Amino acid sequence: MSSNKALVDKIENKMSEIDELFESHKEFIEEALGSDDEPKRIYISGFSKVLHDFYMGLENIFELIAKEIDGTVPDGESSHRDLINQIANVNENRIAVLSEDVISDLEMYLGFRHKSRHTYSYKHEWALMRPLILNVRDVWRDVNEELEAFIKTLK
């Protein structure tokens, strides 16, 4: 049970970091989204970083679960997609961490994560980023709820 407590503490810490990410960028996000006009490039670069950090924060949580409960973390070319698939499936040690609906929502952020790692942030297209920014807090709310439900199974 103590190993579960340690894992729960780590997961909750990472969840708090994602909350802090959104809280610390709240005004920035609301200001830029308050207009239908394309924001300045500096805002697009900032949004790129927020989206990247959001998904990387989630991946850090998923890796903790994969490593400490499943005993294995995917590697290789498709490791990021494999990780999200691993987390979505039940195994002998745990329930599915996330529902199919949430996984479907996260696919867009996984795609953006890949793009942001391989493209200069100033080259991102606002038309593709805007829906991700508009929905990111709702997606986080849904992921957070499912992570909380998962954590309850560890207590």
Image (cartoon, rainbow, N blue to C red):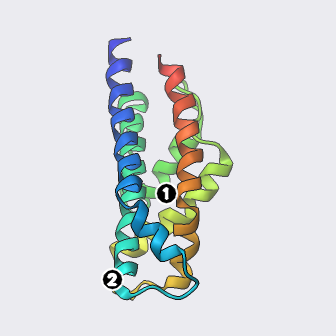
User: Which percent across, then down, holds residue 25?
Assistant: 37, 61
Q: Which mark, by number, is residue 81?
A: 1
Residue of label 2: 42
35 above or below 69? below
Whether residue 119 is visible, yes or no, is no
Work out which residue is located at the far top of the displayed protein and give it.
Answer: 1
x and y percent of residue 103 in the render?
60, 52
Look at the picture and state if 12 lies above or below 111.
above
* Disc 2 element: helix
- Residue drawn at (50%, 63%) of the image: 109
Q: Position of residue 86 (x, y in %)?
A: 51, 43
Q: Which comes sooner in the sequence, label 2 or label 1?
A: 2
Query: Label 2 amino acid?
Result: Ile
Residue nearest the observer in this picture, 16 or 85? 16
Tell me which residue sits at (54%, 21%) in the image. 153
- Quadrant housing residue 16: top left
Q: Secondary structure at mark 1?
A: helix
Q: Nearer the viewer, residue 74 or 2?
A: 2
Residue at image point 41% right, 28% down: 69
Residue 38, given in percent of the width and then of the height, sits at 50, 88
In 3D space, how far apart are the residues under numbered discs 2 and 1 (Cα atoms)?
29 Å
